[in-house]
Amino acid sequence: MKRIDNFNAGPSALPLSVLERVREELVDYQGTGMSVMEMSHRSAAYEAIHDAAEAKLRRLLNVPDDFRVLFLQGGASLQFAMLPMNFLGPDETALYVLTGVWSEKAAQEAVRFGHVVVDDQAKAEGYTDVPTQVMRPADVDLRYVHVTSNNTIYGTQWRELPVTDSPLVIDMSSDILSRPVDWTNVGVAYAGAQKNLGPSGVTVVFVRDSFLARANGDVPTMLGYPTHVKQRSLYNTPPTFAIYIMGLVLDWIEEQGGVEGIAARNREKAGLLYRVIDEYPDFYLGHAKERARSDVNVTFRLRDDELSARFLAEATKRDFVGVKGHRSVGGCRVSLYNAVSVESATRFATFMEDFVRAHR
Amino acid sequence: MKRIDNFNAGPSALPLSVLERVREELVDYQGTGMSVMEMSHRSAAYEAIHDAAEAKLRRLLNVPDDFRVLFLQGGASLQFAMLPMNFLGPDETALYVLTGVWSEKAAQEAVRFGHVVVDDQAKAEGYTDVPTQVMRPADVDLRYVHVTSNNTIYGTQWRELPVTDSPLVIDMSSDILSRPVDWTNVGVAYAGAQKNLGPSGVTVVFVRDSFLARANGDVPTMLGYPTHVKQRSLYNTPPTFAIYIMGLVLDWIEEQGGVEGIAARNREKAGLLYRVIDEYPDFYLGHAKERARSDVNVTFRLRDDELSARFLAEATKRDFVGVKGHRSVGGCRVSLYNAVSVESATRFATFMEDFVRAHR
């Protein structure tokens, strides 16, 4: 069996112990005589998996009791539409803080439903930073403020969520469960699972009761949050197998010391790479400003463009997967989500140092 | 390892050889050093899986070249909304042929977007039949006629698709790939995967170019078919692992003699149960009229209500899973989707006969 150092930006690495457990239970789940994939979503065996996944998420992230937890489909991209469809009336205004392509896409969908104002400070800087202070028009009531907590493409991350006088709606797709969440000001948080939580095909949504209470009732059944709240994400067949695997990943996070343990480990992994970047400033150039550096996506380029191509080719040869930067930024991106080991990060940091020595 | 006789209505049985293959490749897919779940959806390895799944579907179902094949999320329930959102303008009319709860739900979503007329002949009969001829208002142009090809809850199925002068939009969720499709009059066909195709979490949509050409351009990005056509179902992260397993199921169908082979086998399996029902008319009562009997869901009750409960308890004791009928119909439902073996069906037919002998 071969296992490579997987730095994919998503879908991405899963813990080996989780994959081994899935393999072990694949054909006969705990003596039921069938795979989890073959179970009715109305069966007691599946409902236990479903409810346990929710309970584990609540426990790990300290989710307050006045939040509903949903397992939906369609990824963050469908949330971009569902959010304003449910929560932004034609006469209401939402503020979207632009910190990358994904927040731009979220804002573009919201324009179809209501008024949108943007904070585009970070855009002007080429998305190398997140705002130190969110800017909002003084004379408008805001239904919500939309924020992307981590920007996969640019490798920037809010170290702390911004403080605003309106509820936050947060796209946490790329850093959910990578660190604790301060829920104080959150109305909705959502995340596709495929980076830190499990396989693609399931989207986790947290929505506060008081925020939900103002939902527009006149939306298609499948696109209304109240439908899924009322039916505990079992209105129609959920992606049962993906939810099962997510549950196993959550067990694994618990074993790592919970979100605090994972956060420390993520900081350590990212630190290994940032240290090399900072040590060789004439060789490597980080994309993100230091204060906005992400713990889960480390983005950089080589100052010498020709060497960049060689660096990527050499990384591939050494079985480092997923290192090429997103086409809109170029260079390199090393994604260090929860399941990426400290050993993998160490190997890559060593590779970066060796490469400097060989090519400087 | 235990394997039971799985008659679940969906999610449902998968071929054992497919599950074994998934297990074998789970931690290291073909020497890539990672699971399919851990691959980028933009990687060559995943794109090969994605494209092969489409090619196999096209080949097995003889899909004409002027159809696009999409892999979406949200199940048939999301299609109920997406279809009229894209294809039914506020001044247009669609006909929905009601043959069960699912077609009723489809019609209810369409009402939000345009005019809906229904053919409710089957409803008047308690959904024991499908119409022999579709009835439509004489004086209206129909944008499309929506049909549910098989009705899981009632065990009824169109033996042949109805002939109309408007394009058909067909929900094939419960009998896709169980038999050949006549595409002549089809505009759109769609199906959740979790009955005949694979795990839950992926929805297959076939849409004809000429039908697509009239799509409403002003819908949220993720809810517009053109988005997914243009991006080959890779606009955002698709449910990669579910698509991979579907591909393996399609290989298995090919090995069974393709859709023709599967159809013959399905007919044989259903025949085993219908024969017992017909042989003991004083004991068993089929729900569906004979001409509308489904090859994939066999629904019946025992004439004696008290014996019904005993029958279900005895079936459970013998490791027959999923035999209880849907709450809206009661009695028993035995789902005999593609992956259910002739041996399983034979065992259940024998059980039914034995039960008659023991309790008559």
Image (cartoon, coloured by chain):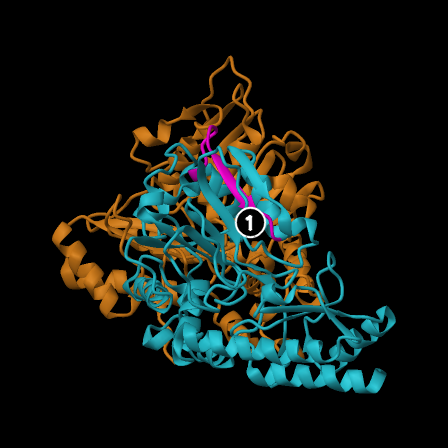
Chain colours: A orange, B cyan
In the shown orientation, is residue B128 left or right of residue A203?
A: right
Q: Name the residue rendered at 67%, 82% in the picture.
A: B349
Q: Quadrant of residue B256?
A: bottom left
Q: Is residue B342 above or below residue A81?
A: below
Q: Residue furthest right?
A: B306
Does the magenta segment cover residue A46? no
Helix, strand or loop at label 1? It is: helix
Q: Is residue B306 left or right of residue B264?
A: right
Q: Describe residue B284's horizontal placement relative to residue A178 as left or right.
A: right
- The span picked out in magenta is B87-99
Queried whether the magenta region covers residue B91, the answer comes back as yes
- Residue named by callout 1: B77
Residue A234 is situated, as x and y percent measured from the top left of the image, at: 64, 53
Q: Is residue B301 above or below residue B349?
A: above
On-image quarter of the N terminus of chain B: bottom right
Question: B209 or A227: nearer the eye?
Answer: B209
| Residue at 51 percent of width and 12 percent of height | A139
Q: Position of residue B276 (x, y in %)?
A: 69, 80
Q: Is residue A281 above or below residue A109?
A: below
As drawn, the residue found furthest toward the top would be A139
Can residue A291 be seen here? The reply is yes
- Chain letter of mark 1 equals B
* Front residue of B128 and B149: B128
Quadrant assignment, res B144: top left
Q: Is residue A235 visible to the viewer in this orientation of the structure?
A: no
Residue A84 picture location, percent across and down: 51, 32
Task: Give the class, few, some or many, for how many residues have Cα within 10 Å of label 1's Cα (few <14, many ≥20).
Answer: many
Could you tell me the amino acid type at mark 1?
Answer: Ser
